[in-house]
Structure formats: C-alpha cells, structure tokens
Image (spheres, grey):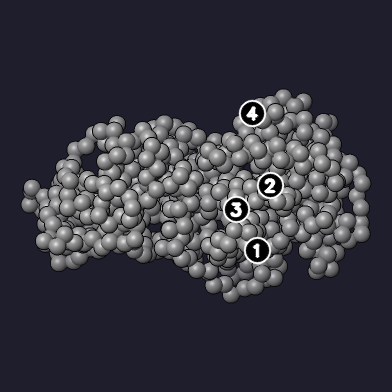
C-alpha cells in the first residue's frame, strides 16, 4: 500500500465540490492534496507539498508551499450540472523544469470496495491480466500517461454506495515530445501536452490523481508482459511564462459497474463529440486497393492454397508459410470477400484464386474428427494440434457466408454443407452444460483450456447455421451459449480472453459478446428479442470504451504523426497488447442496429467516425504508409509508449498480419450482411 507523504486538507476546493455536484445527492466533503516536483538538470528532483488558500468568493484558490518555490500556482473552480471544471495556471518566476500533481479523495470511497476504469486500458482491477502487465497483482495504485487511454480519463465506482467519480482532461492535447529514455526522471525534449491520470490507495482510501506532464507509476509498461521502472517527466517553463491546465471532475450514481461505464462513456463522448475523418478516396477505391492483397499474397501448395497474411515483414510483405483459418490469418473470410468481389468486377483471375482456395480446404482442410486444420506453417513443417473455438467459429462463419452467397447465385455445394454439419456436431459435443465452449481443445475433444471467455465467437455461426440449415438444435445451442454470456460475462462486466495471444481483459471479448447478442436478437421475437437487444447494448458500451474518442499526439519524426494519423475511432487491443488497430468486422453494423432499436444516436454517429478513421492508412503508390505493398493494410499501430519489441510509439512493429486487417475493413465496407443473411 502506498503511504501518504503529502499534506491532506479539507479545503475550500473540497467544500465547493460537495456543493456543486448533482442535485439530490448527499453532500460530501472532498479532501485534496497536491505536490510539485522541480528538477535541476543532472540532479534529483525536489518535491514540494502544496496547500490551498481560497479567495473570499470561494471560486479561486492558490496552491502554496511552506518552502519558497519559483512558481505561482492558481486555481479556478466553475460549477457544472454534474461536477466542476477545475482550471490551474502555473506561472514561473524563473526558468524551471516542473511536474505538477493533484489528487482528490471522496471520504466514503474505501479502496477495497472500489472498481476502477481507465478506458481502453483498465477495467475493475485488471485481475484477468497477469502480474507482468498492469494489474492489481502488481499494485493497487497506478498512474499512466494519457495517450494509453481511449479517453484521457480515470474513474472509480464504489460498489457499496453506488457512487462514482471521474476526472477528464479538459483541453486539447496536441503536442508530444521525444524522450531519450522511458524510466526515471526525464526532461522532455520539447513541447508536450501529455499529462497523466490514475488512482492511488493511500491508507485504505481511494484517491484519483492527475497532473502534468506525464508520470507512470509504480511501473511503466513498455512492451508485451514487460513492466519497467516508473517514469516522471518534466516540462520546461521559462521565466514569465504560464502553463494552463484544465480538468472536469464529475460525480454520479450508478446501479452497477456496467451502468457506471455506460454513463461515463456517454458523458465523455458528449464532451469530445468526435467527427468523421475526411478522406479523399471512395469506398470503391478502398476495395480496389485492398484487393491487391488477394492477388499478391496468394500461395499454392500441394496441400492447402491460401493468402499469406501472417507474420510478414512490413518492409518486404513477402510470402510466408502460415495458412491460418481465422484470428489473424482469416484465409477463408478473405477468400469469400475476394470471391464476391471477383464476381462483381468480372475478374476471372481472382475468381480462379478463390476457387482453388475453397477447393483445397474442402479436400485437405479438415482433421479426422472434422475440425478445420486451423494453423499450418509450411516453412517450419509445423501444424497445431491444439484448436480454438474462436478460429473454428471464424471458419464456419466464412463458409456459411460463402454458401449462402452461392445459393443466392443458384449454385449449391453439398460437400461443403456436409463438412459444416459435421463440424457443427462437434460444436454441440464440445458445449458444456452451462452453455460455454472451451477456449482450446484437441482433435480427440480433450479440453486444453476450459476458459469460457471465447464463447461468444461460437454463438454467431450457430445462429447462422440454424437459419441456413433450418435446424432448431443449432439455435437451441446458441441460446444456451447466450445464457452463459449473460450470466458469466455481461452481468458481471467481465470480458476477457477472447484474443488468442493474451490472457487478459480485451476489446474483442466485449465486441464478440455484443455481436453474439445482435445475432440472437435477429433470430428472436418479442420479449426475447428485447432482452438480447438490451444485452447487446450493455456489452457494446464496454466494446466502445476501447475505441478512441480523441486524437493522441505524436512527435515530429514519429511516422504516424508525420502521416497525420488521427486516432479517433481506432480501438486499443487489450491490457497486454497496448496498441491500436482496425478490428471492427461487424461491430459497426451492431452499433447501427442498436441505434435503431434503442434510439441511441451516439452509436450510429460514432460508427461513422470509426468507418472513416480506420481507412486513413490505406497503402497505395505514393501513400504506402510504411509498408512495402499496395493493399497490405497495417496492423500493429503503436500509439503510446509500448511496442512488441520494435520501433515504439509512432511506428509499427516490424512484423504484422494484414490477413485480418483486410478482412476487417472489407467487412466494415459490406454493411448489413448479417441482417441480409438472417432474412427468412
């Protein structure tokens, strides 16, 4: 537990907070504490505790130190409907390098009763994450730089009282500075707007902390499962200069953690009101560019034919031996999209490519038990013998989409239908009594990972199969899985381990849960339909919380900044994998559907932002965006101080998987496919 070394006072600031929060709430006094660190180059920083002195009208205040410091620190408080706007100005009497920190305490907020929220990075206690990633396993107090977060915000929910607090940075964050090192005390190389936010346990009480420039403690997270020593940065303020800072401190009540997240996301969305990104190319042009991936990545073998879209070097984009059904390869879904596109364009070459892929998988793509051969690496002569419900589900989804399309064109494929029914029978055998599906298993049905976090990926193809084959047993299984999702994931606000390369809280678990409920809603009527819509909406708020509502800054010389990338609409991946990407697939359709069903226009408005923003890095001649080939859409977009091992903020990792990025964007550009499929 962190011990308070600061000076805690029941300040006028605190009393004003209690007066100006939402009407009807019990008045509550807020304690505050502050500090400023001043650094002389080459020497350890000096720390100064701060206390407040207020004006007669109680609307302005000064932060004072018992020691003489070369700074004037003044505050102003402006009441709002649900809290206050808190403005701070720091003015230097001489040249200084400083770091300013403020924290507030709600007296009733006992740390053990609280759950925390830093969107796109922290959910509850992050206890699904390992100790090598930010979580309560390592510490119950965390400060992080703002660009880790999909909104520069921290929030706390008190489960005993139902009360929550949130603190949101209230100004544009446009500039970032290169730093020579990422731990210890660091003087910033230039101008930066990045601050920090977080929460701290001090003597069993919860404090929300925030300040400028950024700090990270007790660790900074530099790459996958790699925590490093803390970092504190210092900004330069020249004599006579003033630095203005602003935050919004809000308070409210919520029925549970899910209600807390939805309310905070909604108010944060209303604060930013992100706009669509203006592009100078059409959706038709996007598909034309992406289709080059289908042609250039095609690989033939004596066994399986596939698109090489896994483990590629960004500066080469050459062929690799990895044939992967789902997850990051998405061979069959890409084959379906390429097949559709070839028909629309009359492209005989592409049509031939897709047919050879489907033929090879029909002939050689299944195990003895009828599962897809998920992952085959021809370079290493390796094939996985551990299968996943996610990849298998994604394969079924792709083939059922293909079969439905073909049927509507007057073409039938009975052998494919036979294989799908055999695989679906395997699904029914794998399903547990509680409705869940094991995350990983072997061809003999031995369960390797019983975790149910990937269950929603199975719900979707089961609903589709019930419609395509007109068999109630598949819908019955899907409903059973939906009940599990409601009980174990959605009602508990516990979304985890849907991605296959991490064991942690992640975006894809909530996104898949929302999509699963969307499909069940499409297959249902009356009260059941309404229940699934409500569950989809609940899960969607968690999925949305991973998507950026603002544009993180980059320093000059960081490629993504030089390209002008706007991060709004991009989604962070997981607690372990702290980068942004274009994972969307059908989620925009889910948002548009929920907007119609629930009259929540924010969903459809933000879907427009996502749909435009995710196309910014489209690689074509003269605009290759750091990759070697046209249409090989980037994947690991490193937007903060984190990397997979190469290059860091503002760049990509040197290895990427365009197989899934192309499939994701193509599905985004094919709206309404689920509703069309599910029509009777």
| Outermost residue toward the front in this view | 24
Q: Residue at x 46, y 66 (%)?
A: 273
Q: Does residue 116 sit above or below 560 in this rendering?
A: above
Q: Residue at x 65, y 38 (%)?
A: 483
Circle 3 is placed at which residue position? 583
Foreground residue among 29 and 46: 29
Question: Closer to the observer: label 3 or label 2?
Answer: 2
Residue 206 appears at what percent x and percent y?
Answer: 31, 39
What quarter of the picture does the N terminus occupy?
A: top left
Mark 3 burial class by Cα count in 10 Å: few <14, some 14-19, many 20+: many
Contact between marks 1 and 4 (CB within 8 A): the answer is no
Circle 1 is placed at which residue position? 630
Circle 2 is placed at which residue position? 528
Question: Closer to the observer: label 3 or label 1?
Answer: 3
Looking at marks 1 and 2 on the same chain, the residue that comes earlier in the sequence is marked by 2
| Image label count | 4
Foreground residue among 400 and 307: 400
Looking at marks 4 and 2 on the same chain, the residue that comes earlier in the sequence is marked by 4
Whole-angstrom CA distance, mark 3 to mark 1, is 20 Å
Residue 647 appears at what percent x and percent y?
Answer: 47, 51
Whole-angstrom CA distance, mark 3 to mark 2, is 29 Å
Mark 1 burial class by Cα count in 10 Å: few <14, some 14-19, many 20+: many
Q: Is residue 367 left or right of residue 169?
A: right
The picture quadrant where one finds residue 340 is: bottom right
Q: Which mark is residue 450?
A: 4
Whole-angstrom CA distance, mark 4 to mark 2, is 28 Å
Q: Is residue 30 left or right of residue 311?
A: left
């Amino acid at each position: 537990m962190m011990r308070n070394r600061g000076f805690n006072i029941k300040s006028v600031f605190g009393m004003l907070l209690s007066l100006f929060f939402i009407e009807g709430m019990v008045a509550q006094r807020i304690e505050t504490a502050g500090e400023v660190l001043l650094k002389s180059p080459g020497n350890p920083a000096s720390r100064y505790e701060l206390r407040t002195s207020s004006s007669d009208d109680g609307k302005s205040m000064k932060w004072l130190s018992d020691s003489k410091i070369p700074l004037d620190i003044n505050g102003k408080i402006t009441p709002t409907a649900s809290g206050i706007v808190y403005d701070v100005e720091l003015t230097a009497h001489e040249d200084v390098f400083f770091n300013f920190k403020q924290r507030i305490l709600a007296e009733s907020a006992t740390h053990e009763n609280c759950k925390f929220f830093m969107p796109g990075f922290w959910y509850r206690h992050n206890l699904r994450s390992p100790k090598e990633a930010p979580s309560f396993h390592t510490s119950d107090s965390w400060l992080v730089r703002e660009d880790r977060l999909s909104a520069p915000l921290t929030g706390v929910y008190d489960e005993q009282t139902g009360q929550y607090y949130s603190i949101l940075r209230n100004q544009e964050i446009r500039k970032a500075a290169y730093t020579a090192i990422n731990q210890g005390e660091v003087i910033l190389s230039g101008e930066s707007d990045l601050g920090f936010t977080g929460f701290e346990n001090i003597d069993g009480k919860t404090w929300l902390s925030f300040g400028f420039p950024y700090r990270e403690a007790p660790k900074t997270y530099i790459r996958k499962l790699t925590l490093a020593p803390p970092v504190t940065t210092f900004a330069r303020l020249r004599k006579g200069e003033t630095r203005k800072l602003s935050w919004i401190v809000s308070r409210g009540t919520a029925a549970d953690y899910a209600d807390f997240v939805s309310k905070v996301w909604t108010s944060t969305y209303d604060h930013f009101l992100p706009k669509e990104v203006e592009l100078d190319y059409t959706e038709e042009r996007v598909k034309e560019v992406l289709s080059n991936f289908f042609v250039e990545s095609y690989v033939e073998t004596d066994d399986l034919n596939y698109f090489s879209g896994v483990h590629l070097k960004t500066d080469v984009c050459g062929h690799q031996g990895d044939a992967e059904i789902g997850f990051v390869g998405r061979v069959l879904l890409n084959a379906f999209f390429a097949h559709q596109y070839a028909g629309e364009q009359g492209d005989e070459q592409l049509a031939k490519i897709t047919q050879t892929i489907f033929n090879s998988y029909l002939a050689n793509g299944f195990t003895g038990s009828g599962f897809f051969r998920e992952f085959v690496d021809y370079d290493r002569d390796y094939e996985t013998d551990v299968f996943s419900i996610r990849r298998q589900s994604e394969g079924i989804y792709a083939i059922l989409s293909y079969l439905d399309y073909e049927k509507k064109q007057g073409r039938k494929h009975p052998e494919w239908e036979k294989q799908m029914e055999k695989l679906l029978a395997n699904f029914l055998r794998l399903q547990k009594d509680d409705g869940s599906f094991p995350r990983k298993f072997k061809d003999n049905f031995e369960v390797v990972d019983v975790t149910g976090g990937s269950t929603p990926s199975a719900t979707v193809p089961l609903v589709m199969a019930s419609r395509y084959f007109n068999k109630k047993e598949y819908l019955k299984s899907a409903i059973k899985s939906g009940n599990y999702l409601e009980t174990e994931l959605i009602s508990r606000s516990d979304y985890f381990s849907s991605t296959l390369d991490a064991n942690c809280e992640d975006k894809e678990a909530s996104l898949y849960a929302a999509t699963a409920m969307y499909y069940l809603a499409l297959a249902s009527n009356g009260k059941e339909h309404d229940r699934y819509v409500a569950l989809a909406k609940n899960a969607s708020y968690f999925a949305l919380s991973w998507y950026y509502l603002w544009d993180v800054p980059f320093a000059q010389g960081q490629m993504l900044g030089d390209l002008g990338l706007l991060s709004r609409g991009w989604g962070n991946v997981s607690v372990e994998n702290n980068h942004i990407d274009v994972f969307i697939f059908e989620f925009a359709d889910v948002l548009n559907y929920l907007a119609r069903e629930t009259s929540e226009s924010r969903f459809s408005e933000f879907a427009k932002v996502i749909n435009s923003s995710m196309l910014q890095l489209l690689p074509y001649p003269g605009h290759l965006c750091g990759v070697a080939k046209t249409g090989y859409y980037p994947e690991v977009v490193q937007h903060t101080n984190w990397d997979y091992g190469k290059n860091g903020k503002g760049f990509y990792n040197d290895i990427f998987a365009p197989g899934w990025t192309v499939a994701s964007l193509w599905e985004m550009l094919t709206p309404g496919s689920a509703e069309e499929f599910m029509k009777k």
